[in-house]
């Protein structure tokens, strides 16, 4: 889609979402105060989004995934249409809120597969460690959980109260590009409107949990096959992507690592076809293949 001129009205995010939900056959279900977006049929596949996001992080993936799975794309606590967690919530409490909602949605004994992105990867690690034999497979795209990235500078810009709506929109666009996407061309007006919607609905500071150093403790406690993916141009891994891969392989040598070419942090959106193919190959492969 072509970008609009600065003076053109921004697309309405809620109208965009209503249209996309209808196109994808997505139904929103509230469980335990959390919004769970369901599509398809088959084994349960839970999708956890990134920070300052919502289930919309998976808009380019649900159609393909729902042909093989019952997709459950969660708005995590404090994001999208889900209730906010308590102010003093800790890691285990936050994970527990999602676990309770999923148990209510699919049953406390049901098998489940997880695909998690960024902040959702940090939370997914905690969820996966507690699911035990119920967890079939775990896929992590650019997960957090490596500790605070001291010294990392993404070049984000700040909003000012005296900015016009168009100027604020330009800041949102810049920051989306700086953090999430490798190419300006990946940001059309609908994508930007959905991103701004996610920011405005955010009521939880995700770095409170995503900057915890939990991956070395939790990853070895997960018995199922684990896939880890990153975009080759992702600016988020610190001090480097190789360092993060090394940390993971030191505690879980059998992880499957996939690098998605020409993609930034939000690789499942920017290179959806490549991501979908790699994820499905992992998820549908027989255990001993």
Image: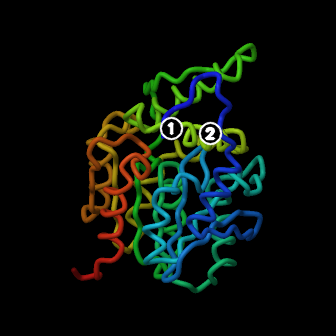
Label 2 Cα crowd, 10 Å radius (few <14 / some 14-19 / many 20+):
many
| Label 2: which secondary element | helix
Q: Residue at x 41, y 58 (%)?
A: 140
- Circle count: 2
| Label 1: which secondary element | loop
Q: Residue at x 29, y 41 (%)?
A: 262
Q: Residue 193 has which mark? A: 2
Instruction: In the rendered view, tell whether residue 191 sits above or below residue 255.
Output: above
Question: Where is residue 222 drawn, in percent x and y?
Answer: 41, 69
Q: Residue 188 has which mark? A: 1
Question: Where is residue 256 drawn, in percent x and y?
Answer: 27, 62
- Please say which color scheme the image uses: rainbow
Question: Where is residue 265 drawn, in percent x and y?
Answer: 41, 42
Q: Residue 76 has which mark? A: none
Instruction: In the rendered view, tell whether residue 190 sits above or below residue 171.
Output: below
Q: Residue at x 44, y 69 (%)?
A: 65
Position of the C terminus by quadrant:
bottom left
Q: State left or right for residue 221 relative to residue 106.
A: left
**Relative to the observer, which residue lies in front, 170 or 4?**
4
Q: Earlier in the sequence, mark 1 or mark 2?
A: 1
Is there a contact, CB below 8 Å, between mark 1 and mark 2? Answer: no
Question: Where is residue 50 drawn, in percent x and y?
Answer: 54, 49
Among all residues in the image, which is located at the extreme bottom? 109
Q: State left or right for residue 250 relative to residue 182.
A: left
Gap between marks 1 and 2 measured at Cα: 9 Å
Q: State left or right for residue 266 relative to residue 253.
A: right
Label 1 Cα crowd, 10 Å radius (few <14 / some 14-19 / many 20+):
some
**Relative to the observer, which residue lies in front, 172 or 53?**
172
Q: Quadrant of residue 206?
A: top right
């Amino acid at each position: 889609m072509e970008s609009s001129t600065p003076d053109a009205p921004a697309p309405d995010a809620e109208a965009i979402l209503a249209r996309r939900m209808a196109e994808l056959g997505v139904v929103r279900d509230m469980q335990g105060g959390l919004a769970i977006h369901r599509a398809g049929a088959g084994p349960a596949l839970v999708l956890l989004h990134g920070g300052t996001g919502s289930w919309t992080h998976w808009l380019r993936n649900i159609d393909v995934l729902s042909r093989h799975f019952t997709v459950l794309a969660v708005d995590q606590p404090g994001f999208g249409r889900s209730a906010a967690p308590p102010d003093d919530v800790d890691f285990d409490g936050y994970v527990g809120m999602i676990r309770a909602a999923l148990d209510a949605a699919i049953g406390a004994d049901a098998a489940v597969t997880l695909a998690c992105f960024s902040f959702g990867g940090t939370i997914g690690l905690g969820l996966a460690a507690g699911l035990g034999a119920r967890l079939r497979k775990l896929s992590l795209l650019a997960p957090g959980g490596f500790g605070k990235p001291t010294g990392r500078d993404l070049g984000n810009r700040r909003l000012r109260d005296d900015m016009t709506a168009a100027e604020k929109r330009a800041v949102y666009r810049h920051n989306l590009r700086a953090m999430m996407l490798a190419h300006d061309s990946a940001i059309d007006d609908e994508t930007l409107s959905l991103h701004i919607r996610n920011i405005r609905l955010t009521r939880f500071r995700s770095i409170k949990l995503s900057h915890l150093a939990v991956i070395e403790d939790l990853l070895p406690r997960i018995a199922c096959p684990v896939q880890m993916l990153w975009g080759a141009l992702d600016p988020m891994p610190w001090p480097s992507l190789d360092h993060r891969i090394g940390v993971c392989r030191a505690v879980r040598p059998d992880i499957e690592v996939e690098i998605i070419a020409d993609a930034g942090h939000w690789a499942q959106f920017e290179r959806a076809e490549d991501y979908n193919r790699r994820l499905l190959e992992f998820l549908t492969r027989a255990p001993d293949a």
